[in-house]
Amino acid sequence: MLNAKVKPKQGPQPDIITTDRIRRLLKFRRKSKKVHNVINEAIYWGVLTREWAGSYRINWERCAYVASLIPMNPGDRPLNNGSQHYDKRQWGEFRQALDVIKEFWEFVRATRVQAFARVPPVLPADNALTPPLALPPMPPNGLLRYTVISIAGRLLPALVLGRGNIYLVPIGVRGGAQSCFPCIAYGGKHLCFGSLRALLSLVGSLAEPPEPFPYGGHSPRLVIDAGRGGLVPYESFAPTNGKYEPGVQVLDSALLYSCLVRWRDIIITSRYRLPEELRGWPALVLEPSSGTNRAVSRRPDTILRDVPLCIDALLGLRQSVIQGLKGSGLSPQASVPYAIALARTVTVQAQDPPIDIYVEIIDGFKVKEGKNRYRHEGGRRLLTLEEFARLLSARDRPTVAETVRVIVPLADSPYLKEVLDFGFLFIYHNDRKDPPNAVRAEFRGYEGVTEAHGKEGTMKLALGLIHLLGLPLASTYQALTRA
């Protein structure tokens, strides 16, 4: 029933559903009383609300939220009786639930054999890291999202649940019937463990447990992307023209494994890649990797989970850069005054848009008309995520957005939009220039910026911008997860 809306062959789905319709969806017999058990459970979770006798209003947002949680126990009916339980064995959502549970237990078994790993210290770039905590093997087409979080000086593998704001560390999970986990809330974010004993063993001795963040990485180093000249250490780079991009390279960041799998790059900008409606205001932009356009067209709610996860991983990356470069000649803390001084030299007028998730459709939609026959429909459009999901669910034929770009306006912060008037921050992994376990945040200045400020000035702009992102990213995260 939770996935009824996303089945294109059924046509547009109404917001009101009847008891008979629910019975047919679940393939219960007409006189079966089990349908009322399902309805009462759906009302408890906020999926349904009673409108009048025998009719219920569907809350599709709650449907997406409940569907994203792990089904620990999908039912007690056996699956080996083909005649009596044929309906349930053929129920696609039930089969998907079994796949999720299988993947979940593989993850649990893999985490049981890994001890808590200490957060690696900052190491020289040429020094090998003592075996870092590795994520358990991920299926190529897995249904769950994984990450590594850092808390109390330790690294922990975790599942990402809910709207991307629930981290479940499956240490202490007892059995398949367990459906409740002890959690700690952090203002929109939750850290959960498989048992209370596991939770207390890690944070019980702390007066105020630190907020968990996806592990930002270690060994940050300043680098310059010199184009065809490749990646050059900052100290040994001698600029001959203005065509270079300074940045920070970090190893083993969870951003690479949790966000940059589905999204090719992350951009913090106020002009570049933004439509006219949002131009001038600082925003976070996610550009899709191969296959992401089709995936989010089939399940738009994946964007709702990915955006908070990416923002939280960016906050973890920022923490690692600040801690790793602390005390060096060029550090984010020491670069803030320089960035603010430059920001005061410009005036930027921009309208403050509401904090929401926007989806920009670049090339319209591809609509399937028959076997191997498609038609192109529409052009560039800017929609909220809710409008994007509603538009796709109302189609009576399979529809895929050709190219999507996810845009999130950031919360207001002093001097941020003025600093972004000089350039933008581009966060990505380059297969040709970066090691396999590295992610890079580089500052790409607009025309004339690198020539005017030189190598050191442009690097200070980049580091100062990274430091200034803390408050707007945290405020945006809380606004999205509490909405």
Image (cartoon, rainbow, N blue to C red):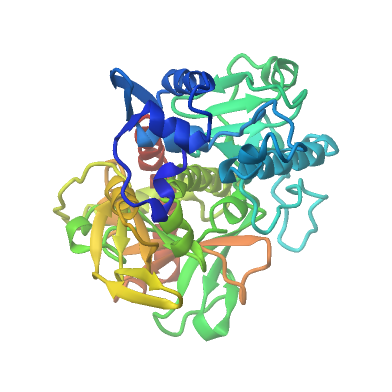
Give the answer, above or below, for where 405 lies relative to 44: below
Give the residue at x 59% y 47%: 216
- In the image shown, does 111 or 18 lie closer to the viewer? 18
On the question of residue 114 being in view, the answer is yes
* Front residue of 412 and 258: 258
Total number of numbered discs in the rendering: 0
Q: x, y percentage for residue 354?
A: 23, 42
Residue furthest to the right? 113
- Residue situated in front as seen by the camera: 147 or 387: 387
Q: Position of residue 420 (x, y in %)?
A: 30, 58
Q: Is residue 55 left or right of residue 276?
A: right
Spot occupied by residue 346 in the image (x, y as percentages of width and height): 19, 58
Quadrant showing the C terminus? top left
- Name the residue rendered at 54%, 48% in the picture: 317
Quadrant in the rendering for residue 360: bottom left
Is residue 125 found left or right of 244 in the rendered image?
Answer: right
